[in-house]
Image: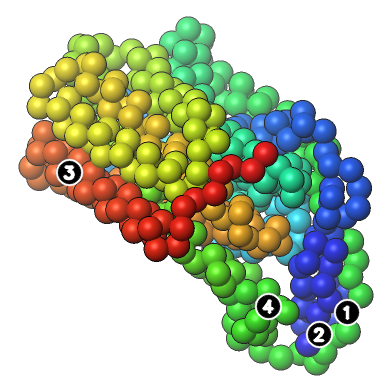
């Protein structure tokens, strides 16, 4: 086996026949001018469009339950199928994107998202909903890994912190935009389960055009020698040519990781982003039923507005803290999550709408800071040819416990009731976030202060 380093610093290893295609650096790395700033912003749109689909179905499940007659337990399966698709996608899309480029991963993912829209719009059986959610999870996994890395690629080496900011903001803004659009359109227009996904399909269509035209690094042929076939054994955690060894095989699906030297950055990001994404998922799952009880209303707009407010807070806080050090952002995220979970427990015990809204805003802000801090740390140390895999690793650390929450919360609520279950989960998440913040502070005291955000 042999390899060749590309202009971006990536090394391609080939096993068995023909030249392999690898990412060549674009922008400064490739010797051409950096992309215009407006392209950096536009490159974030596909991430927003895919994440809008991720939560668009949430306000509509009550309609499908009435029409198709499935139980709450079956609804849990529908939710879980999304997490299965997401995690499966994260296991391979980061590796594939780093090897073959962002566009070859993103375009098929957008095709899956469009297929999911068609299934949602025409669903007449719960199995169709399960497959649609599975396809949605697969598309979201590609957006998390390849899509967010593409934003950083377009931003270029001199604007990596801006790339992390826009990629992270696009994700959370889309996650909030989906349920808001779904709630409003389903309440005001006919054929709600069709209209919502027709609009979402149009958004995904524009996202596909952006991916097709965005100035991401292109694939170029890399001549390499072709060795005799050999069994695939493993893929090293660091690129060939790095100290400590290189890849000795090609593995297309594996638990994503980061190069040597970036492990602590990943650990610190997961320590805060993990509790943050679980907290927002908890509020998303608990909020609609609480609002229905507190306001005595079955409006689909109100839960959608609550979700939008949570993710809007997540978006705005990232722009507000972007110039702070990365460690400060992570600690702020941990504090916000702790306050959010304490406020949520207060909301459950006092039946106060203001406390529920405050909990959503605080949880969203904490998740946003955890995500931005984690992505920024990875962007500061991980080279472009491993960045999509690193993004996937951060997301696995957050979404895996969020998937377990969906199942655990349902069983615990059935066993002890909503109040006790919410209290248990709130205290658990507050403790986890507090420990994450303490880890960041301890690491900061040992390794020095986080540096100011680069322009």
When the figure is inspected, residue 169 is found, relative to residue 245, above or below; the finding is: above
Q: Are marks 1 and 4 in contact (CB under 8 Å)?
A: no
Contact? badges 3 and 4 (CB < 8 Å): no
Looking at the rendered structure, which numbered label has been put on residue 224? 1
Indicate the secondary structure of the residue bearing disc 1.
Answer: loop
Q: Position of residue 364 (x, y in %)?
A: 39, 32
Which image quadrant for residue 314?
top left
Q: Which residue matches tag 2?
A: 2
Is residue 287 among what the camera can see? no
Q: Residue at x 25, y 34 (%)?
A: 339
Please state, as top left, top right, bottom left or bottom right, where the C terminus lies in the image. top right
Residue at horizontal 56 percent and vertical 18 percent from the top = 195
Sequence-wise, the earlier of marks 1 and 4 is: 1
Badge 2 crowding class, 10 Å Cα cut-off, few under 14, some 14 to 19, many 20 or more, is some
Closer mark to the observer between disc 1 and disc 3: 3
Q: Nearer the viewer, mark 1 or mark 4?
A: 4
Kindly identify the residue that appears in the image at 76 percent across and 61 percent down.
100
**Alpha carbons under labels 2 and 1: distance apart:** 7 Å
| Front: mark 3 or 4 | 4
Other residues around mark 4 within 10 Å, as few (<14) / some (14–19) / many (≥20): few
- What residue did someone put label 4 on? 242
- From the image, which quarter does the N terminus lie in? bottom right
Image quarter of residue 447? bottom left
Dot 2 or dot 4: first in sequence order is 2
| Label 3 residue SS | helix
Residue 427's label in the rendered image is 3
Characterize the local packing of mark 3: few (<14), some (14-19) or many (20 or more) Cα atoms within 10 angstroms: some
């Amino acid at each position: 086996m042999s390899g060749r380093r590309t202009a971006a610093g990536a090394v391609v290893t080939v096993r068995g026949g023909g030249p392999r295609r690898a990412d060549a650096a674009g922008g400064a790395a490739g010797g051409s001018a950096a992309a215009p700033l407006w392209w950096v912003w536009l490159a974030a749109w596909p991430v927003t469009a895919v994440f809008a689909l991720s939560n668009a179905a949430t306000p509509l499940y009550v309609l499908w339950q009435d029409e198709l007659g499935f139980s709450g337990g079956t609804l849990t399966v529908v939710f879980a199928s999304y997490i299965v698709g997401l995690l499966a996608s994260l296991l391979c899309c980061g590796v594939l994107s780093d090897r073959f480029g962002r566009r070859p991963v993103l375009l098929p993912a957008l095709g899956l998202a469009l297929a999911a829209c068609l299934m949602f719009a025409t669903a007449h059986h719960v199995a169709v909903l399960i497959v649609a959610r599975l396809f949605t999870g697969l598309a979201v996994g590609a957006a998390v890994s390849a899509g967010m890395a593409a934003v950083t690629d377009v931003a270029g080496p001199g604007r990596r912190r801006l790339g992390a900011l826009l990629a992270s903001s696009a994700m959370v803004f889309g996650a909030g935009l989906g349920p808001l659009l779904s709630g409003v359109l389903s309440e005001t227009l006919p054929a709600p389960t069709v209209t919502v996904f027709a609009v979402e399909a149009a958004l995904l269509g524009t996202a596909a055009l952006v991916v097709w035209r965005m100035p991401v690094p292109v694939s170029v042929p890399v001549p390499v020698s072709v060795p005799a076939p050999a069994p695939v054994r493993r893929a090293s955690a660091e690129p060939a040519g790095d100290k400590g060894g290189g890849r000795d095989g090609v593995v297309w699906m594996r638990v994503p990781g980061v190069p040597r030297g970036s492990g602590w950055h990943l650990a610190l990001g997961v320590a805060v982003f993990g509790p943050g994404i679980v907290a927002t998922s908890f509020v998303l799952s608990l909020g609609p039923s609480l609002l229905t009880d507190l306001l005595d209303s079955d409006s689909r707009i109100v839960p959608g507005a609550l979700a939008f407010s949570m993710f809007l807070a997540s978006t705005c806080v990232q722009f507000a803290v972007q110039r702070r050090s990365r460690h400060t952002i992570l600690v702020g995220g941990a504090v916000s999550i702790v306050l959010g979970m304490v406020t949520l427990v207060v909301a459950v015990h006092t039946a106060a709408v203001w406390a529920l809204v405050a909990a959503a805003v605080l949880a969203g802000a904490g998740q946003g800071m955890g995500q931005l801090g984690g992505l920024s740390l990875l962007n500061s140390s991980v080279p472009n040819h491993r960045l999509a895999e690193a993004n996937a690793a951060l997301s696995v650390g957050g979404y895996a416990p969020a998937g377990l929450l969906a199942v655990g919360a349902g069983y615990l609520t059935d066993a002890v009731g909503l109040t006790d279950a919410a209290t248990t989960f709130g205290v658990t998440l507050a403790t986890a976030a507090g420990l994450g913040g303490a880890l960041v502070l301890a690491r900061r005291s040992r390794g020095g202060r986080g540096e100011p955000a680069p322009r």
